[in-house]
Structure formats: structure tokens, C-alpha cells
Amino acid sequence: MAEGNRFTLKIITPDRIFYEGEATMVEFNTTEGEIGVYKAHVPTTVIIAPGVLTITDGEEQKEAALHSGFVEILQDKVTIMAEVVEWPKEIDLQRAEEARERAQERLAGKAPGTDVARAEAALRRAMARINAVK
Amino acid sequence: MASMIDIKRRKVSIQSTQQITKAMKLVSTVKLQRAKVRAEQSKAYFDCMYETVTSMLARVGHSEHPYLKPASSGKKAVIVITSNRGLAGGYNSNVIKLVTKGGMKKEDLVIYAVGKKGRDALARYGYEIRGDYSDMIEEPQYADAMRLANEALAAYESGEIGEIYLAYTVFKNTVSHVPTLLKLLPVETGAEDKNGEKAADEEKQAPMNFEPEDDEALDLIIPKYVTSLIYGGLVESAASENGARMQAMDSATSNAEEMIGSLTLLYNRARQGSITQELTEIIAGAEAIS
């Protein structure tokens, strides 16, 4: 990849700077659907939906589970203000799978008093974690 | 002059107090280091959050959004962040004074208390305590701030309260902590007092698009903004608490040192006095015999 295609990527969480470096492309899930961002994107602010974050720098690819926050996209700089983001090595796969099953059961059961929105959010979070590990 | 035994007893008691204050100082120094690192790590997030939100608000300016327009309800909520333990100098009372002397009427206020000291003091003054979140000040987690923010926002959205304030202590550096009352909601548009110059750099020139639309984006971003401010308040207050305690214990230790010094002088004087008196008595006795 040519040098000119890279932009600065910063991922910040309340407790730490999760990632700071250069990238050629970054992909993530937003409330409006999945998007991929190259350099010189139109300045935009988007809201994150739970999903897999993929950072591409030339041939190298990194993945992480990104759950909530928002992203500020500028021409040569992308800042992800993440409330929750995890590298695959920080994810407990077994726990995520258990959480997925629980959420699916709750959604399928349709028991009265089920908080559907909450169960769906839990399911999406679990899926994001599982997908990031695989 | 007090007897030698009395002076000695007093000295021993001050010495043991000094040992305690010395140990407390060491403990809070260590805790301060940890809290300081946390406060510094999270600073990047808040600066960024603040910049983004101010530049956003500069754009949407006069929105009719409920988070931005002046509230209808006269009730005000104050999130008061103090410590669970005392012996921190003026740390707690300074924050409490912000609430009691801040010019707000007692009847209009509801308190969300973080920290037992603030909760107890305000309850004693007769304020309405809505919630107690004292457990979260020991190890502030982002999830804790979210919980508190959600409850306060729910009360705001239902129209029960019209304004939300945050009373906390800004951690400037190890020796300087400033008690501050910050308005969280409604967000004051055009208020760029904190770092106004920063927001005016190149990012503002580029027109920003929002996906989804402005109002919807505000719906999602403002709660995150509030949460991050509360979290920042928690982290900074935790650092300030330990800084204040360290200072208080440091001066207590040096005061004890001073008192021990003057008591030692007094003790020696009393001892010398008694020796002199004994000698005089012996000499007088010997003279009487001869």
C-alpha cells in the first residue's frame, strides 16, 4: 500500500487509549449499518452499534469487539470514542457463548415480561464478541 | 508546672497518634499515585468528548431538543461526589459548602449522593437524598457512572427534574484541588469556557455530517457526554480525595513532631527542676547538721 492512503486512527475509551496508529481502512458497525472508512472520507459523526471492528493497515489486519460509543471521521483522522471495546484476547469466549444462548432462549421463549430490547442488545453484544474471536 | 509523669504520658500518646498519621499519609500517597494515573489516562477521552460535543452544539445551536432547551421543572438534581471516609482536611466540607451556599433553595434540590460523608452531612441539613451510590467512589468504574447517569437522565426525561448539576473536586495537581459545581443538563450551547480556543481549530471549518440526523445523534451522544462527565468527576474526585488526605496527614504528622519537641523541652526542664530542688534540699539539710 502506498503511504498516501494511510490515515491516523485513534481509539479512546474512558480508561485507556485502546489504539493509536496508522491505518488504511477501518470497518465497524453503526446504527445505520456496517461501514468501511478510507482516507479522505467526508467529515461525519456516526453512532456505533455492537459489532466487529477491523483495522486494516496494508497487509496487516486487527480485529476487536466494539460495543458502543461514537466515531468522528475527518479527512485524515478517525477518532473512535468507544465506551466498551475489547481485543479478542480479552474476550472470554465461553462466557460470550453462554450469554448468546441465554439471550436466544429469552427471545424464543416470549415469556411475558421479557425485556425484548435488552435481550436483543445482549444477543448483539455476545455475537460481536464471538465474531471478533473467530 | 505539670508533673514529669503527666508530660511523659502526653508525649507517648502524641507519638502513637503520629505513627497513625504517618501510616495514613503513606497509604494515601500510594493510592494517590494510582488514582492520578487513572485520571490522566481518562483525560484524553473527556477532552475529545468535550471537543466533539461543543463542535456539534455549535452547529445545531438553537435546537429545540429537550437536552438543550431550558427546563420547565424548577427541581434541580445535584450529584454530590465526596469521600466515604474523613480525615481529608477540608475536602468533604468544601464540596458540601458548594451545595449549601451555592444560592440554590433547599426545597428545590434533590441529591444523588456519592460518598457517605456528603450524604450524611446533607441529610443532616435536611436535603432530600434521592439515591446513595457511595460504593462507587472507592474504585470508580465506567459502568458505575453509566448506572448513575441513566437514573438521573430518566428523572430528567420524565420532567421530574429540570436541571442536573455535578458537585465534585477538580484535580489540578497533587497539592491543588478545586471544588467545582458543573451544570450537566440542559447543555448550555455556546458555553466554551473550558477550552474554547481548542474547539476553534481546523475541525470546525469542515462541515460535519451526522448519521443518523442531528436530533437522533444528540439523543445518543448527550447521555454518553453526561456519563463521561460523571465518570470524569468520579475519577478526579478520587484523586483529589487522596491528595487532600495526604496533605492533611502530612501536616498532622509535622504538627505532632512540633508538639513532641516542645513537650520534650518541658519534660527536660521539669526533670532538671526536680534535680535542682533535690540538691538544694540535701545541701540545706547538710548545712543544718553542721
Image (spheres, coloured by chain):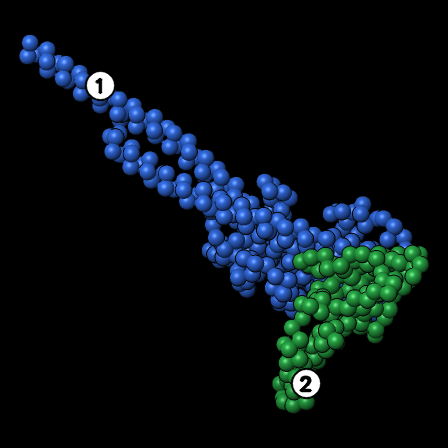
Determine whether A2 is above or below A115 in the image. above
| Chain under numbered label 1 | B
- The quadrant of the image that shows the C terminus of chain B is top left
Amino acid residing under circle 1: Thr
- Specify the farthest residue to the front: A59
Query: Measured from the top left, where is residue A43 in percent x and y?
Result: 88, 60
Looking at the picture, tell me which residue is in the foreground, B120 or B133.
Answer: B133
Residue A103 x, y percent position in the rendering: 66, 82
Q: Is residue B33 above or below residue B164?
A: above
Q: Are marks 1 and 2 in contact (CB under 8 Å)?
A: no
| x and y, in percent, of residue B217 in the image | 80, 66
Quadrant (top left, top right, bottom left, bottom right) of the N terminus of chain B: top left
x 48%, y 37%: residue? B251
Residue at x-position 64% and y-position 58%: B231
Q: Are marks 1 and 2 on the same chain?
A: no
Disc number placed over residue B276 in the picture, else none: 1
Relative depth, front residue between A93 and A60: A60
Residue matched to label 2: A104
Q: Residue at x 76, y 55 (%)?
A: B48
Q: Which chain is green?
A: A
Q: Which mark is residue B63?
A: none
Q: Mark 2, residues whose alpha carbon is within 10 Å: few (<14), some, or many (≥20)?
A: some
Q: Callout 1: few (<14), some (14-19), or many (20+) C-alpha neighbours within 10 Å?
A: few
**Colour used to depict chain B in the structure image:** blue
Q: Can see residue B269?
A: yes
Q: Is residue B229 visible?
A: no
Q: Chain of mark 2?
A: A
